[in-house]
Amino acid sequence: MAASEKTLTIDNCTTSEGWTVVLPRRSRQRRKATQSGVLEEKQEPWTPTDSLTDPSKKATLVQKMERCMNKIDKSEFYHTFRDQIQTSIADYFSKVLASEIKMQMVIYGIGSIELYEPPRLQLSLAILLKRDFSWIGNVEVFDPILSATESQVLETLGCSVMSINEHGRREALKPTMFFMPHCEAELYNNLLQANWKLNLLKNMVLFGNSFETYEQHVSLCKNSPILNSVGHILAARGFTNEFRIQTVSDDYYNAFHDSSWHIFSPLLESELQFINS
């Protein structure tokens, strides 16, 4: 997402959880009308926001990331987070993996890891998950605001930086973990729309903003501008297994508050009725 700080902002209507919902940014030049009438962005080639890397900035950022990963690794937050995966939701991950050995990870909207701590914490968590769970495969990362230096650091940390802006529309043709904490509602909606088929949804695990909270927000704010961006999110609630995480301490609240694991289990095509948003 382009909001470097990944701040959750909204239309003066907040949820009881205290977080607010990011509104979509429209780009008419990059959106087209599909046959169904839904607007969607075109996938397009992407390069970093700058063309030159700074070796000193790269070294400093690598050090920041190492400190961040070490901090999370030793925290009660990470112990609790990892334990949840190993216990209460382990069977769900196994079901998504099915006969596959690895589940690829796609990170959308990480934000600026150079300028802000929450994106560094979020990226650190993703890297630690890959380290600790052998079934997590390649890690791909994308955010249109990434600089050349940040892209190099991501590569140094074992991630691949995408050269295409998919606008969140990656089809889960194989088991895929979409790691998207505090992204825009529109990006989650794009992802669901692109995978609105039984054989694709079953391949997905999503870590991001609570869908339950979106539903609560819409019920409280009838005139919310996000209504046009959450159609698939709300429709998916009927077949989504959602598991909230615990931030445990204030150190991790800004980066992970109101985040959940989402696993999708529609049984019938009739559950995937047409959603015009």
Image (tube, rainbow, N blue to C red):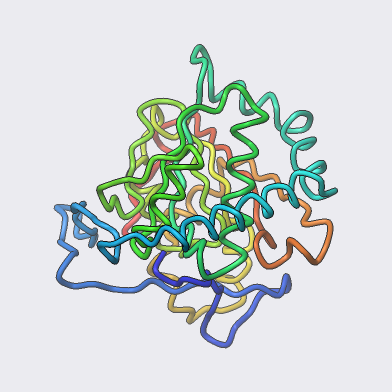
Question: Which of 53/44 is in front?
Answer: 53
Q: Farthest residue to the top: give it.
A: 99
Identify the image quadrant of the N terminus: bottom left
Residue 102 in percent (x, y) is at: 51, 21
Identify the image quadrant of the C terminus: bottom left
What residue is at 77 percent from the left and 64 percent from the top? 251
Question: Which of 44/214 is in front?
Answer: 44
Question: Which of 14/182 is in front?
Answer: 182
Work out whether 71 lies above or below 173.
below
- From the viewer's perspective, tell me whether residue 121 is left or right of residue 224: right
Residue 149 in percent (x, y) is at: 39, 58
Q: Quadrant of residue 218?
A: bottom right
- From the viewer's perspective, tell me whether residue 193 is left or right of residue 41: right
Residue 224 in percent (x, y) is at: 48, 79
- From the viewer's perspective, tell me whether residue 22 is left or right of residue 85: left
Q: Quadrant of residue 188?
A: bottom left
Q: Quadrant of residue 147?
A: bottom left
Work out whether 259 lies above or below 17.
above
